[in-house]
Image: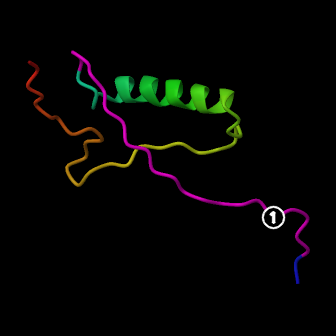
Amino acid sequence: MVPVSRVLPVFKQVLKLEVESDQNVNDPDVKATILEEIQQRLISHGMPEQANLQWRQQANGNVFQRTENVRE
């Protein structure tokens, strides 16, 4: 039996967000910038720095879905 010195809880949480941008938010550089900003905000609110953040990709390879909003 292998001794366990410390057991850390493991969980997955999914966040939905809406982004308004003139740029292609599925561009790898833009996605990386958005993910870094989210990670910094979560760390400032107490998330461990070792936490792994990643995008959930759709079957077509995109992360974000384009929606057409009609503004009045």
Q: Which residue, as the protein is rendered here, is positioned at the far bottom?
A: 1
Residue at 37% x, 49% y is 56
In this rendering, position of residue 7 left or right of residue 69: right
SS majority, magenta: loop
In this rendering, position of residue 56 left or right of residue 25: right
Viewer-proximal residue among 32 and 22: 22
Kind of residue at disc 1:
Val
State the quadrant of the N terminus.
bottom right
Image x and y of residue 58, in percent: 26, 51
Residue at 27% x, 32% y is 26
**Residue that mark 1 sits on:** 7
Viewer-proximal residue among 72 and 12: 72
Viewer-proximal residue among 47 and 62: 47
**SS under mark 1:** loop
Residue 6 part of the magenta segment:
yes
Image x and y of residue 69, in percent: 12, 28
Image x and y of residue 71, in percent: 11, 20
Please determine whether, in this image, residue 49 is positioned above or below residue 52. Answer: above
Image x and y of residue 61, in percent: 25, 46
Q: Neighbour class for label 1 at 10 Å: few (<14), some, many (≥20)?
A: few
State the quadrant of the C terminus.
top left
Residue at 58% x, 26% y is 41
Magenta stretch, residue numbers: 3-23
Residue at 45% x, 50% y is 14
Please determine whether, in this image, residue 60 is positioned above or below residue 20. Answer: below
In this rendering, position of residue 53 left or right of residue 66: right
